[in-house]
Image (tube, coloured by chain):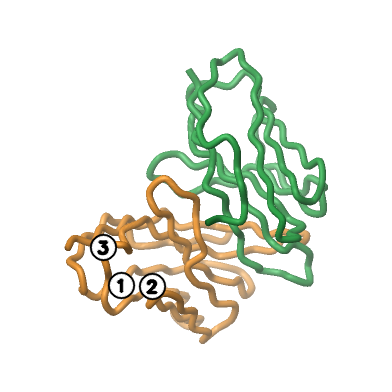
Amino acid sequence: DTEVTQTPKHLVMGMTNKKSLKCEQHMGHRAMYWYKQKAKKPPELMFVYSYEKLSINESVPSRFSPECPNSSLLNLHLHALQPEDSALYLCASSLGGRRFGNSPLHFGNGTRLTVT
Amino acid sequence: GNSVTQMEGPVTLSEEAFLTINCTYTATGYPSLFWYVQYPGEGLQLLLKATKADDKGSNKGFEATYRKETTSFHLEKGSVQVSDSAVYFCALSENQGGSEKLVFGKGTKLTVNP
């Protein structure tokens, strides 16, 4: 069982819908990540939060909006997506902080998103 | 920038065969190196890691040694099982402002037949 929980597991949405992906961890990790994974490809980094502040945005389109309400939760708000945004969206967390440099990431099982 | 090159599959083996998946990296500094595994329908799981030269990571019969002189981190297992069928990703880690940026290889799909 993964220690990073993502909901929902599957999501189908139209191009005019607004939806949110949720991620939760209770390992005391202070860095949280959103990745996008297309079929047969490695994950691509989208956003990183470090101590609840956005620290990395990999030039992601504004139709994806991340939010970190507290140290255990991470959301990804979706609006006006395109069919090419269909993918597996993975959340991950790590210890975070320079003191724990190069600590491994713990991934959730992802949300399979289909945009119609 | 930093990069990871790994052997592209797919790799198909019979049960109890020996496995090697090659991985080489290009990096400034001394990154940590990881192997992640992704089973069908799941997220990525950390398989093993090494944080400095000559470190050997091991888990579930898999091993990889951090070789600075050849910039490699090859994954090996002496006797694979059907349950090892998955996609394997080699990755290096860059610490940026207190968070980890993973650079992944393209992944290698392994199928083990009974």
Secondary structure beneath dot 1 equals strand
The residue depicted at 71 percent of the width and 69 percent of the height is A101
From the viewer's side, name the closer residue of A95 and A11.
Answer: A11
Q: Relative to B14, does residue A49 appear above or below in the rendering?
A: above
Name the side, left or right, on which B8 lies relative to B1. left
| Label at residue B75 | 2
Q: Which chain can be seen in green?
A: A
Q: Which chain is orange?
A: B
Which numbered circle lies on residue B20? 1
Q: Is residue A96 left or right of residue B21?
A: right
Q: Amino acid at mark 1?
A: Thr
Q: Which mark is residue B82?
A: 3
Vertical side of B77 occupied by B40: above or below: above
Task: Name the residue at the front extreme.
Answer: A1
Which chain's residue wears label 1? B
Residue A6 figure quarter: top right
**From the viewer's perspective, is residue A110 above or below residue A4?**
above
Write the residue at 58% across / 44% down. A35
- State the image coordinates of residue A109 (x, y, percent, origin top left): 52, 47
Chain for numbered disc 2: B
